[in-house]
Amino acid sequence: PADCDAAIALLRRVEQLALKEPPHRADLVKEIGDIFYYYNHDLDAALQEYDKVVGRYPSLNDNIVRITKLRIGDIYLDKGDGDKARATTMAMHGYNVRSSGLHV
């Protein structure tokens, strides 16, 4: 985790330098979430970072947002919330869960 903390600090500094480059910033924030998720096993911290990507860059025409949404679904699965995982994945694919008649 000490190496993870150093990596997160470095990525946050680089993010500040990439202020005018939304795709790069989104990728950096996603990478911070990945460190929390895969190395620190801190699902809540990872979810918080992934939510930043989805919230700040919703119209970014890039796979970064799609991959991030998949990771959010994975976190919900890891937390045992299959309904939220399914809803997240379906929303990512453009399904309106409420109007589709599908039960989640």
Image: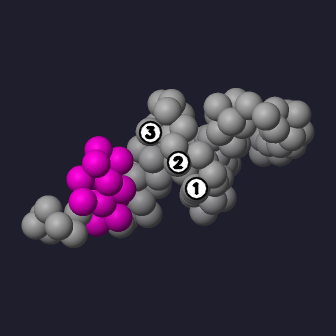
The front one of 28 and 58 is 58
- Badge 2 marks a residue whose secondary structure is loop
Give percent across and percent down for residue 70: 41, 44
Above or below for 85 versus 17? below
Q: Callout 2: few (<14), some (14-19), or many (20+) C-alpha neighbours within 10 Å? A: few
Give percent across and percent down for residue 15: 81, 38
Residue stretch in magenta: 82-96
Label ID, residue 72: none
* C-alpha span from label 2 to label 1: 6 Å
Image quarter (top left, top right, bottom left or bottom right) of the C terminus: bottom left
| Residue corresponding to mark 1 | 55
Asked if the residue at tag 1 contacts the one at tag 2, i.e. Cβ–Cβ closer than 8 Å, the answer is: yes
- Badge 3 marks a residue whose secondary structure is helix
Amino acid type of disc 2? Answer: Pro
Report if residue 42 is visible in the image.
no
Asked if the residue at tag 2 contacts the one at tag 3, i.e. Cβ–Cβ closer than 8 Å, the answer is: no
Image quarter (top left, top right, bottom left or bottom right) of the N terminus: top right
| Residue corresponding to mark 3 | 66
